[in-house]
Amino acid sequence: MSGFFETGRLRIRFTSLLAAALAILIVDPLFADSGLSTSRGGATLGGRGMYFRAKDADTGTWSGGAQLRFHLSRVLGLEGSIDYRQSRFAGTMVDVYPVQASILVYLLPDLPLTPYLLGGGGWYYTQLRGHDAQHRFGPHAGAGLELFLNNHWSIDGSYRYVWLSDIHSQNSSHPLGTNLRDSGHMVTAALNWRF
């Protein structure tokens, strides 16, 4: 039954993102000085939704975050992002704040809809409920697709695999502690504004 609700939430989030993109396409011409454009200069700031599924987690989780992208050229970009996620590992709640830095390489830079490759690293502040915080570092790699709606707005979606060291949990049922595998799959969807 929980799988049904997760699928329903995914559809609602996707529908909301699609509705926001359509609203921008309809409303933005009233304020913009030009139509669709492949302009890549400057920086973009965006809010994003994030889904993460760790290897040992009971389920995947949805959460939110933000990203800042610097478009160095039509082909190359840099992204900094911060998110929040909460996972449950066999009853243990874990709060994680991923701060990531990524290099983006746009494969078809002259088109409004362009795929890109990404790679980078991140710092993960991790708090197990009732335990000391852990600081972990890990690389990530993946790909995405960005649609430049006009000179001011874009939407993007990305997939990345994140390699992380295990979370060490000490509890009374395991006196020596257990290691929870937190590497996993991360999917994001964002709405960006260029300034």
Image (cartoon, rainbow, N blue to C red):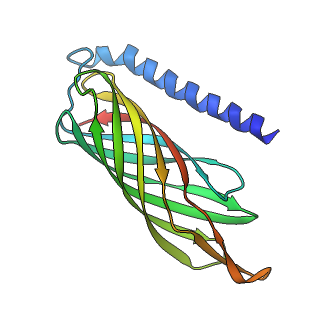
Asked where in the image residue 10 lies, by quadrant, the reply is top right
Q: What residue is at 42 percent from the left and 53 percent from the top?
A: 140
Identity of the residue furthest to the right in this view: 1
At which x and y percent is residue 119?
35, 49
Asked where in the image residue 137 lies, by quadrant, the reply is bottom left
Quarter of the image containing the C terminus? top left
**Nearest the camera: 120 or 82?**
120
Q: In the displayed structure, does residue 82 sit left or right of residue 80? A: right
Picture layout, residue 184 above or below residue 133: above
Q: In the displayed structure, does residue 96 sit left or right of residue 119? A: right
**Nearest the camera: 132 or 30?**
132
Picture layout, residue 69 above or below residue 174: above
Q: In the displayed structure, does residue 100 sit left or right of residue 87? A: left
At which x and y percent is residue 156?
40, 33
Q: What residue is at 37 percent from the left and 40 percent from the top?
A: 46
At which x and y percent is residue 147?
36, 25
Quarter of the image containing the N terminus? top right
Q: What residue is at 63 percent from the left and 28 percent from the top?
A: 11
Q: What residue is at 46 percent from the left and 46 percent from the top?
A: 160
Number of labels in the image equals: 0
**Nearest the camera: 145 or 79?**
145
At which x and y percent is residue 85?
56, 55
